[in-house]
Image (spheres, rainbow, N blue to C red):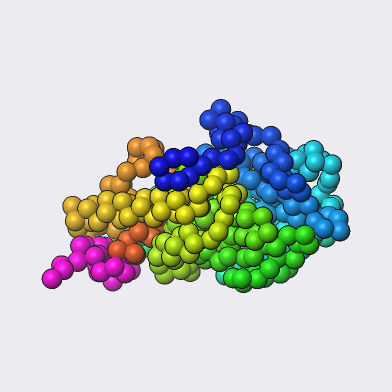
């Protein structure tokens, strides 16, 4: 256990992370397994959690990325516990991102399972999938230009309509879960906990019988989840996220099962660490605004500390960085520390406080 009170319980998961591999399927508790579903990028895999249901069948919390190798891994993982996709009765989606909802449609087609998510993410996902790939691309380009990106850079980062075509296959939900609702998974007492920030409709699930807390991407043990702005999204997503962290810190969670990385104990301690991280980030950004008044979010992102040199950022990584910078700027505005000029492409300066 570290100084914050966080204790690693998913030791095999963390060992695989350090070895740059993917862990094996793991029995977490009687009737509960963690199935790692590989994905591209630095996160490497998604933890799909499989729950054995009273009376037969399985429930899933998240599914993994929509790719053939991810589908094969999910099917193999279920086979490894003596089951199959056809046994799935319901899918709980913590949030609408591709790596969590991506395979839900294939699971539903193979099993007839229902898919559930929060209404806010259902609305955003419906709007997103309703756009043509061409329209979706133009919406993102326009949003990035509105944050100060030169149009050629915005187009290079947004990608092509062909690359976006598969996003229209994402499964829309059959059921909606509001905060406090109980998931229809017999033998479990999963309560939906609305935790907006990473997405507007992000859900965690607290099982009151076992003390397990399925955290999705809201609280991860090592990294800070991306909190970003997007076209048509929440006005102040970082404020929403910090409020959600305050809320989950009060949950009586015996063990946290996140969507990435490894299981751990110490939800309140990890929530404190994440809040402190964002306060440091806000202070760094405020210093950048003071040093570079009249800058756009695109400009300011280049003056912040990232995991690698800013010149190496491109495509989705640069989009995440700039939109995360924008989210932090909006909270500084809310706190009265920074002001924007109100232009179509806003530029920011430090507020003159009395």
* Left or right, 136 with reference to 308: right
Report whether residue 308 is seen. Answer: yes
User: Which residue is at the front of the view, 97 or 282?
Assistant: 282
* Left or right, 111 with reference to 173: right
Residue at the spot 15% in from the left edge and 67% down from the top edge: 352
Q: Position of residue 35 (x, y in %)?
A: 70, 43
Image quadrant occupied by the C terminus:
bottom left
Q: Position of residue 189 (x, y in %)?
A: 70, 63
Q: Is residue 158 above or below residue 180?
A: above
Residue at the spot 58% in from the left edge and 35% down from the top edge: 11
The part of the image, by quadrant, that contains residue 161 is bottom right
Q: Is residue 281 above or below residue 313?
A: below
Q: Position of residue 140 (x, y in %)?
A: 48, 59
Indicate yes or no whether the magenta region holds residue 340: yes
Q: Report the magenta residues as a range.
A: 333-354
Residue at the spot 66% in from the left edge and 41% down from the top edge: 36
User: Which residue is at the front of the view, 124 or 253?
Assistant: 253
Residue at the spot 21% in from the left edge and 62% down from the top edge: 349
* Left or right, 172 with reference to 112: left
Q: Residue furthest left?
A: 354
Q: Is residue 120 above or below residue 167?
A: below
């Amino acid at each position: 256990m570290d100084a914050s009170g966080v204790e690693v319980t998913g030791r095999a998961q963390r060992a695989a992370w350090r070895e740059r591999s993917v862990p094996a399927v793991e029995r977490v508790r009687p009737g509960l397994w963690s199935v790692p579903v590989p994905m591209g990028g630095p996160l490497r895999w998604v933890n799909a959690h499989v729950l054995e249901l009273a009376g037969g069948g399985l429930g899933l919390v998240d599914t993994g990325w929509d790719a053939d190798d991810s589908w094969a891994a999910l099917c193999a993982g279920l086979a490894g516990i003596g089951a199959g996709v056809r046994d799935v009765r319901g899918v709980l989606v913590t949030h609408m991102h591709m790596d969590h909802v991506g395979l839900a449609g294939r699971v539903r087609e193979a099993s007839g399972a229902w898919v559930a998510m929060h209404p806010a993410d259902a609305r955003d996902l419906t709007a997103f999938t309703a756009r043509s790939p061409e329209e979706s691309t133009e919406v993102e380009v326009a949003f990035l230009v509105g944050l100060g990106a030169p149009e050629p850079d915005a187009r290079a980062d947004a990608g092509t309509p062909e690359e976006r075509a598969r996003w229209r296959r994402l499964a829309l939900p059959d059921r909606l879960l509001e905060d406090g609702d109980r998931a229809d998974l017999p033998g479990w007492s999963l309560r939906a906990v609305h935790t907006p920030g990473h997405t507007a409709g992000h859900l965690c699930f607290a099982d009151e019988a076992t003390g397990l807390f399925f955290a999705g991407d809201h609280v991860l043990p090592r990294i800070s989840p991306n909190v970003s702005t997007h076209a048509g999204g929440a006005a102040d997503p970082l404020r929403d996220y910090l409020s959600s962290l305050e809320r989950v810190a009060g949950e009586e969670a015996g063990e946290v099962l996140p969507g990435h990385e490894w299981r751990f104990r110490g939800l309140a301690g990890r929530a404190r660490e994440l809040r402190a991280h964002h306060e440091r980030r806000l202070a760094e950004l405020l210093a950048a605004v003071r040093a570079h008044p009249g800058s756009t979010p695109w400009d300011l992102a280049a003056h912040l500390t990232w995991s690698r040199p800013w010149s190496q950022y491109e495509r989705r990584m640069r989009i995440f960085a700039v939109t995360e910078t924008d989210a932090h700027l909006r909270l500084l505005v809310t706190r009265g520390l920074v002001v924007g000029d109100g232009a179509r492409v806003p530029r920011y300066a430090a507020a003159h406080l009395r």
